[in-house]
């Protein structure tokens, strides 16, 4: 039995640390369990690693298989060896301390619980970090316990391939041996080792030209490609020296190597210096397995590793076990003379392939993880991990629990403030249609008040004389409706008989009154105005002081006998000229033409707490954040300075904006959008209400609507379950954040799109459900390990 341990490490040593994703797979490629962890940033470890390789190790001046170059060394060889050994021990201790981090220890512990000591274990380190690739992680004490475990490097991302290598049958292992530039080293020993292997058919190229190598790659298939000679890594690019005059990068052999992979190449061995740059480019070719050297490799070390590895491998040892034993032989044979010799060889593994045995190389049929064969593509753990249906109940339970908790908090009013702020946000975000040309506001300013004799006004903002003059002027221009948004409890004085007659007989004039409550006393309407032309001006204020609701009708009261609001009466009279008549349904709902005004009550939308729900209430759908309608002053009208077309066939609302009458303090969803805080006057508020009713009937503006309780519950639950299912399919913390953020953006887009059509859908509870569900799944996957299949 064998298992694969995949450790995906994303981050850096300097600042971020490494996010760790552990996955253990069976020999068939099935995931047994996953776990998340973290390794902290440790810039000192990275600095120590670089210093060790560059200053301590390279100072040994061994006959390395690198392009000959001048190297200056200080001190005796014995001192340099001793310094390198001390540096190596300190680095090993530093690595051990780093791996003892609390955030990684749970992964370590769970891994040891899952594995048996007698199992062959392939430990794949998947990372892009160049320092991590040079770190000798085989020094992790995990490998002391598991004697058949060996480490390999593997890329984070693996490109999709169109076709896997075709099966072929042959009697001997086909090896292309490339012996490159050999100045100062003895690579004939490498050739002797290869030629001594059983059942092999080596083709040898000694210090060849580039064309000779390409010709061989194109002319026939190979099982193994072997290179010995000088090589080095320049930046991130590997280079091999094939003869005294020529060198090649992998890019220059790209198409020939790709052809070899398509024909069944299984293994590439670069028994030369500094091979990580070579491996990085070779990964893109999807070569199943490679062996390279992390750093400069002494000539004798390279020879001995090759001898022990190939001898053990050809004798039937598993690939990874053969590499480990050959590496450990280097430790025993060369550590005193060449410190860190056993740190140099490293496997580079394509995770889709199972490493072959020597017998597999003869009559080769590619060992490919079963779960990847139908897709015909390289394994990518973020995409190809099969859904484990036994985990579905856990995800559903978590999502249902989270949504249930959120619904409970919401039902108690715990989210009402946030949701109402969300409503305000959507109101603010809507396109602004501008002025409502159907309305004209005549405002009574402080200057208008001061121009009227105090004895005429009698403490009011508008005297009988001024009101008579104003109505006379307006009648000349034929407005469709006139609404007086001023309280006038006392009757007209005896000197204003014409005004009394006008108030009593004009079918276009409407006055206001106010119902009394615990906060305000009631105010009666003008006695001259009949009941059918009266409308109350009571408003509904939410707990945060913002006006979001429009009260259309109520029951009767002693102070104010009318059932309907002033805004409703003005809109009703305006629409009557267009043959649109207001009605009441059998359920007591107001109706204009085909539009039934849905009643707002406790439990509607975000409103969950016990407010005053008496009367027929709807959500107030504000038209604009700016001026709702054209405004002129009382003085401008009386002086004839107003365009008659602004009045003709319009709804004219008369009201005060004078600060002395304290009718400019009302808060709207727009009030906190800018600083300083903006409030509106009562006359502007009435205009917003009238405009809403007219827009609903004449412009097909939708009423604000909402789901019933069961619909809102289902909406929140759906987002919770959907987010949980998506989160279960991803692995890394970055992917969790990305999918959660994307889901929140989609939710916002849905709620915003529906709001433009009048739908007030739960945004805040659904967002909390998404975050809660994804967090629950993440914690479940991090701290709870699924059972093995």
Image (cartoon, grey):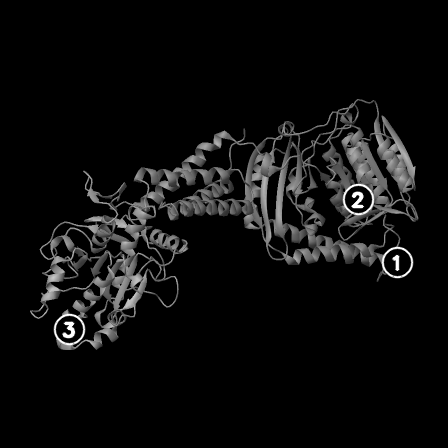
Q: Give the left or right position of residue 683, taking residue 105 as reference.
A: left
Circle nearer the N terminus (3, 1):
1
Secondary structure of residue under mark 1: loop
Residue 402 visible, this orientation: yes
Q: Which residue is mark 1?
A: 70
Q: Nearer the viewer, residue 557 or 321?
A: 557
Query: What's the residue at 81%, 55% (across, down)?
Result: 58
If the image is split into quadrants, where does the N terminus sit?
A: top right
Circle nearer the N terminus (2, 3):
2
Residue 561 visible, this orientation: no
* Above-or-below relation of 670 to 128: below
Quadrant of the rendered image containing residue 167: top right
Q: Which residue is mark 2?
A: 251
Q: Nearer the viewer, residue 352 or 629?
A: 629
Q: Position of residue 169 (x, y in %)?
A: 79, 22
Q: Position of residue 261 (x, y in %)?
A: 77, 33
How far apart are the two marked residues, 2 and 3, measured between alpha carbons? 95 Å
Label 3, residues with CA under 10 Å away: few <14, some 14-19, many ≥20:
some
Q: Which residue is mark 3?
A: 457
If the image is split into quadrants, where does the C terminus sit?
A: top right
Nearer to us: label 3 or label 1: 3
| Extreme-left residue of the structure | 494
Q: Position of residue 382 (x, y in %)?
A: 59, 39
Q: Residue 684: which numbered mark, if any?
A: none
Secondary structure of residue under mark 3: helix
Quadrant of the rendered image containing residue 440: bottom left
């Amino acid at each position: 039995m064998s298992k694969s341990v995949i450790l995906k490490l994303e981050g850096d040593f300097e600042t971020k640390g490494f996010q760790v994703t552990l996955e253990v797979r069976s020999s068939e490629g099935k995931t047994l369990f996953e776990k998340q962890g973290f390794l902290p940033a440790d810039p000192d470890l990275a600095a120590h690693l670089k210093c060790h390789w560059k200053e301590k190790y390279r100072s040994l001046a061994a006959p390395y298989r690198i392009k000959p170059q001048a190297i200056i060394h200080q001190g005796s060889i014995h001192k340099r060896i001793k310094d390198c050994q001390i540096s190596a021990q300190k680095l090993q201790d530093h690595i051990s301390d780093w791996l003892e981090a609390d955030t990684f220890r749970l992964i370590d512990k769970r891994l040891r619980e899952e594995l048996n000591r007698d199992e062959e274990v392939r430990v794949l380190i998947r990372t892009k970090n160049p320092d991590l690739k040079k770190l000798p992680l085989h020094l992790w004490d995990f490998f002391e316990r598991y004697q058949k475990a060996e480490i390999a490097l593997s890329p984070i991302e693996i490109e999709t391939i169109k076709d896997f290598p075709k099966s072929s049958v042959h009697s001997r292992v086909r090896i292309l041996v490339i012996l490159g530039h050999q100045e100062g080293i003895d690579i004939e020993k490498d050739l002797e080792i290869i030629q001594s292997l059983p059942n092999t058919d080596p083709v040898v190229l000694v210090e060849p030209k580039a064309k000779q190598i390409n010709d061989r790659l194109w002319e026939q298939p190979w099982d193994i490609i072997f290179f010995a000679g000088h090589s080095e890594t320049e930046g991130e690019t590997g280079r091999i020296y094939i003869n005294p005059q020529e060198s090649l990068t992998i890019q220059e052999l790209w198409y020939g190597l790709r052809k070899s992979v398509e024909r069944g190449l299984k293994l590439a061995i670069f028994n030369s210096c500094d091979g990580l740059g070579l491996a990085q480019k070779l990964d893109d070719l999807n070569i199943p397995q490679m062996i390279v050297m992390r750093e400069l490799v002494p000539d004798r070390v390279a020879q001995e590793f090759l001898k022990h590895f190939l001898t053990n491998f050809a004798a039937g040892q598993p690939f990874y076990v053969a590499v480990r034993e050959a590496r450990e032989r280097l430790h025993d044979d060369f550590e005193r003379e060449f410190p860190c010799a056993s740190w140099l060889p490293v496997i580079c593994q394509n995770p889709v392939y199972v490493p072959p045995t020597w017998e597999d190389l003869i009559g080769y049929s590619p060992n490919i993880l079963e779960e990847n064969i139908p897709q015909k593509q390289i394994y990518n753990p973020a995409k190809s991990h099969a859904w484990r249906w036994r985990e579905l109940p856990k995800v559903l339970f978590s999502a249902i629990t989270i949504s249930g908790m959120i619904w409970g908090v919401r039902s108690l009013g715990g989210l009402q403030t946030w949701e109402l702020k969300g409503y305000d946000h959507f109101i603010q975000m809507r396109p602004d249609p501008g002025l409502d040309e159907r309305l004209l506001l005549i405002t009574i300013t402080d200057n208008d008040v001061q121009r009227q004799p105090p004895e005429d006004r009698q403490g009011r903002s508008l005297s009988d004389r001024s009101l008579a003059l104003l109505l006379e002027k307006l009648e000349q221009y034929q407005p469709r409706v006139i609404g007086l948004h001023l309280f006038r409890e006392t009757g007209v004085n005896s000197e204003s008989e014409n005004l009394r007659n006008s108030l009593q007989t004009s079918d276009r004039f409407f006055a206001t009154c106010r119902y009394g409550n615990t906060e305000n006393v009631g105010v009666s309407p003008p006695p001259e105005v009949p009941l059918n032309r009266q409308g109350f001006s009571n408003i509904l204020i939410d707990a945060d002081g913002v006006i979001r609701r429009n009260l259309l009708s109520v029951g009767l009261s002693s102070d104010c006998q009318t059932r309907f609001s002033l805004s409703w009466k003005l809109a009703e009279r305006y629409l009557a000229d267009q043959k649109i008549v207001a009605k009441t349904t059998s359920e007591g709902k107001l109706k204009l033409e085909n539009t039934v005004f849905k009643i707002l009550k406790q439990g509607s939308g975000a409103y969950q707490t016990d407010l005053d729900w008496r009367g027929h209430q709807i959500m107030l759908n504000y038209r604009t954040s700016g001026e709702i309608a054209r405004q002129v002053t009382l003085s401008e009208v009386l002086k004839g300075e107003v365009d008659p077309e602004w009045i003709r066939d319009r709804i004219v609302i008369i009201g005060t904006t004078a600060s002395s009458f304290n009718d400019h303090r009302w808060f709207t969803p727009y009030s906190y959008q800018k600083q300083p805080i903006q409030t509106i006057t009562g006359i502007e508020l009435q205009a917003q209400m009238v405009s809403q009713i007219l827009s609903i009937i004449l412009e097909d503006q939708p009423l604000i609507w909402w789901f019933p309780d069961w619909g809102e519950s289902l909406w929140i639950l759906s987002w919770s379950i959907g987010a949980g299912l998506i989160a279960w399919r991803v692995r890394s913390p970055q992917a969790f954040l990305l999918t959660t953020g994307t889901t929140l953006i989609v939710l916002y887009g849905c709620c915003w799109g529906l709001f433009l059509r009048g739908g007030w859908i739960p945004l805040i509870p659904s967002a909390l459900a998404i975050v809660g569900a994804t967090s629950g799944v993440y914690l479940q996957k991090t701290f709870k390990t699924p059972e093995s299949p």
